[in-house]
Image (tube, helix red, strand yellow):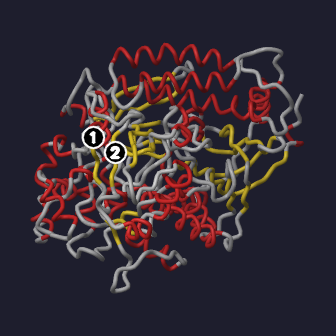
Amino acid sequence: MLNVSEIQTFEHDVLVIGAGGAGLRAAIECSARGLSTGLVCKSLLGKAHTVMAEGGVAAALGNLDRRDNWKVHFRDTMRGGKFLNQWRMAELHARESPDRVRELEEWGAVFDRTKDGLISQRNFGGHRYPRLAHVGDRTGLEIIRTLQDHAVHKGFGIYMECTALDLHLDAGRIAGVLGYWRESGRFVLFRTRAVILATGGGGRAWRITSNSWEYTGDGTAMAYEAGADLMDMEFTQFHPTGMVWPPSVRGILVTEGVRGDGGVLLDSRKERFMFRYIPEKFADETAATEEEANRWLAGDKTARRPPELLTRDVVARAITQEVSEGRGSPHGGVYLDIASRLPAETIRKKLPSMYHQFKELAEVDITRQPMEVGPTLHYFMGGVRVDSDTQMSTVPGLFAAGECATGMHGANRLGGNSLSDLLVFGRLAGIGAEQYVKGLGAAPRIDEEQVRSAVRRATAPLNRDAGANPYVVHDDLQGVMGRHVGIVRTEAELLSALKELDRLKRDALGVKAPGVSQYNAAWHEALDLRSLLITAEAVTRAALMRQESRGAHTRLDFFGEREEWQKVNVIVRKAQDGQMETRAETRPGPPRDLAAIAHASIEDLEAGRV
């Protein structure tokens, strides 16, 4: 019998799982408030999706257009999220984002500047005014650099290349986390009073995705297994512009900043097609002609925004329809042209990462020729259900922030809001964890039999004489999700997906990882399958329940938004019998003052009448 006392053990007040922007900001806050803090990284410190956020961080600083303020940002966010956002979260985000950006600047972030020396801001889809503070097209990298440089002086423990496997509870509250070192395969136990999940999404359940190998839904799955509610899992964002060609880089993101700086989308006839896809609700803010769109880009504040800057769900569906109707590029996408819009030197200065990425990886010079782009699975709006002010889940002591939490973005996230989201709610999660820990009595205890059971389950693939190949199971899963749970969905396809997922769950229970635990990539893959399958099933079941099309969730058999579904969130949780259950939960009505802001006209907001 395994002696749990022989497992390497660390003890902290708070353990943060995930070291992207949300995790780092949460760990900084916890440590600054006097809590013993540990930070677990599945990969190396600095290897996070925050780095991939190129275009900028959304905050109503008003540096380029003084008319911008938190109310307009809040209104844009609610409209972009199809009014399914949690009202309080969207308010906190819009109010606090400017302070978090200025805080980053105080900590050493070097933003691009205006001619007056202020932080520069650029246009982005769904944002009324130029709102994204940026560092060329490397904004996420600068944020991670700044947070890391600030964090190293805080004195908290950092555990790199360590994968968290299970949350352990004592009387229903957080008591610890079991993980393992990826290099040696040895297990490690963290005794802790609180956990903050900041593990990102689960994009690796799809084949065409901008997500890196780490993004297998670990936080979502651990929270689910611990009894926490998941919410809004049907809303998976397909970024409209991922690289389509060559195959070696398919799915890699092309920043929305390319369109914000004047890039246009073209069909196979080299015609701008987005003018045909302007939703009625955005017609008052979107240019209907190329002439007006060009005037807006030239700085005419009376003109309306180009249709290429509509919300991501609208643009992604438009590209999908163009391709399905035979007007796509040779490799199944459309063209994104910046070369004919800006001088080559300006492109290299404003979009240095894009220029080098295409030049080196795809042998495409974006200063001379258009790019082939198409939708790529990019971001989860759904995740762990949390309290808006504290970020605590429905499990006492379990918090979540960033992409693995839900509520802030509703049915569709606006570009740039993810970076300000992780800064705002990473901090609030740290504050919430401090309040919880200081209000806790005796330290929770870990059930050693639970630990032994978790270790046996994790080592099972190493001890089998035969079994399925975990890489084949993962590849099969990606095929299922791509075919049946993609950018457009139907009841028949979703039911087919659930049937296939049941088969894959049985296969995953019997996978074999030959060899020993040290340096065993197949074993890592086998362990990731549980998280991938839980996340995939949660998305599929939630998508089946929501019988409408809203934001990033499109049902061909229930086209268009339905008023009754605006009033509910789909909740996913683990039932007593171990099965996954879904239910539609009625949303509370919005606060009157916030509803007035969200539904106000821009003219009323600018005039201060709301």
Q: Position of residue 245 (x, y in %)?
A: 47, 40
Residue at left 69%, top 58%? Answer: 38
Given residues 136 and 347, the one toward you in this image is 347
Q: Nearer the viewer, residue 608 or 498?
A: 498
* Horizontal relation, residue 533 to residue 177: left or right: left
Label 1 element class:
loop
| Residue 97 visible in rendering | no
Q: Position of residue 174 (x, y in %)?
A: 63, 44
Q: Residue at x 48, y 64 (%)?
A: 352
Q: Position of residue 91 (x, y in %)?
A: 31, 59
Q: Give the Cα separation between the discs numbered 2 and 1.
A: 6 Å
What residue is pinned by disc 1?
Answer: 267
The quadrant of the picture occupied by the N terminus is top right
**Label 1 Cα neighbours within 10 Å, binned few <14 / some 14-19 / many ≥20:** many
* Residue 130 falls in image quadrant: bottom left
As drawn, which residue projects farthest toward the front?
368
Q: Amino acid at mark 1?
A: Asp
Q: Are marks 2 and 1 in contact (CB under 8 Å)?
A: yes
Q: Which residue is mark 2?
A: 335
